[in-house]
């Protein structure tokens, strides 16, 4: 199975803003389990800006742009991935909107991913926050994940967050909200229906960008699984195709 897996900031960083090495290790073990099972995987990783903020300290970071924070945090983030995947090599691909919108650049990205797969290297993709200027930004990694999933004709987009699915309302402000098991087709009503759209304290896209990503993926005929990146069982569920503890946005087969 070909999967594009997006890992959110709230999963990569601890509440103090440091890289959650333990969780990243569990995640790398899970990804390698999928690979040994025969899957091909692309990882979309957030966290560079948060890493920059952590490294420089809040006081210093508050005077810097997102771009500068991403430039500081990106190599730190990549080093953490190299460590947890060792001895399996990982590779960094920093992209901007042109890589998903313009045929020549899109072809370059697609070719790079194929070459890495062929060489047994795990591609890690992130938006080039340090350099992409306003107007050339994809904006959030959930959307980037969906666009890469479409480009690579993936079977599944997996969004790992600090929440185990889509809830009927924002679970951090409404404790009686319940998880939605499946969404056959994302509609405009869903964007208003599922809460205030506020991200968690360390996230950026919030549930709106996850709905948007699932909608884009459905447009490509690809299913989306929104699951908790904090639950180590998630990797076995993916292998088994067990979607009882996540939200599954079903594929629109006619879109294929
Ligand atoms: P990530 O860093 O993984 O991208 P975000 O913080 O951007 O995560 O988005 C996940 C957060 O969105 C959840 O922790 C939750 O606080 C918030 N949220 C708001 N509305 C909802 C909803 N209807 N269902 C699930 N989560 C929601």
Image (cartoon, helix red, strand yellow):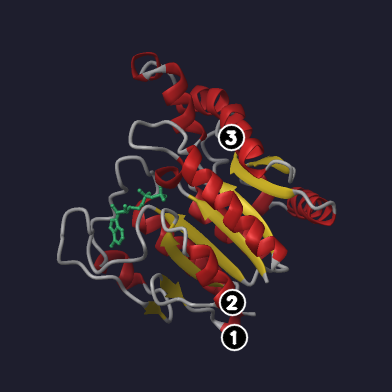
Earlier in the chain: of badge 1 and badge 3, it is 3
Answer above or below: position of 53 versus 144. above
Front label number (1 vs 3)? 3
Q: Is residue 126 visible?
A: yes
Instruction: Choose between 77 and 137: the one closer to the eye.
Output: 77
Q: Is residue 152 visible?
A: no
Q: Residues within 10 Å of mark 2 (few under 14, many from 20)?
A: many
Left or right of 159: which side holds 74? right
Q: Quadrant of the C terminus?
A: bottom right
Residue 103 placement (x, y as % from top left) = 75, 55
Q: Secondary structure at mark 2?
A: loop
Disc 2 and disc 3 in contact, CB within 8 angstroms:
no
Residue located 46% across and 56% down the image:
160
Left or right of 180: which side holds 56? right
- Distance from the alpha carbon under mark 2 to that under mark 3: 33 Å
Q: Which residue is mark 1?
A: 254
Q: Which residue is mark 2?
A: 221
Answer above or below: position of 222 versus 158. below
The disc label shown at residue 80, or none = 3
Earlier in the chain: of badge 2 and badge 3, it is 3
């Amino acid at each position: 199975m070909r999967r594009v897996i997006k890992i959110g900031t709230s999963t990569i960083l601890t509440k103090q803003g440091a890289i959650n090495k333990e969780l990243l290790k569990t995640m790398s073990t899970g990804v390698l389990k999928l690979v040994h099972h025969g899957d091909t995987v692309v990882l979309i990783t957030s966290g560079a800006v948060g890493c920059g903020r952590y490294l420089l300290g809040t006081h210093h970071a508050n005077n810097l742009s997102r771009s500068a924070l991403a430039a500081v945090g990106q190599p730190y983030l990549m080093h953490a991935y190299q460590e947890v995947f060792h001895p399996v090599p990982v590779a960094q691909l920093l992209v901007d909107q042109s890589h998903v919108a313009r045929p020549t650049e899109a072809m370059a990205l697609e070719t790079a991913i194929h070459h890495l797969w062929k060489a047994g290297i795990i591609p890690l993709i992130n938006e080039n926050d340090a350099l992409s200027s306003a107007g050339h930004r994809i904006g959030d990694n959930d959307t980037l994940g969906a666009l890469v999933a479409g480009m690579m004709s993936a079977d599944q987009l997996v969004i790992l967050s600090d929440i185990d699915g889509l809830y009927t309302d924002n679970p951090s402000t409404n404790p009686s909200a319940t998880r939605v098991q499946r969404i056959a087709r994302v509609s405009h009503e869903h964007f208003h229906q599922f809460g205030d759209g506020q991200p968690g304290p360390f996230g950026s896209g919030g549930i709106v960008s996850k709905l948007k990503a699932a909608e884009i993926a459905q447009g490509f005929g690809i299913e989306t699984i929104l699951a908790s990146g904090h639950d180590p069982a998630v990797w076995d569920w993916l292998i088994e195709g067990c979607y009882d503890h996540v939200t599954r946005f079903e594929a629109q087969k006619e879109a294929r």
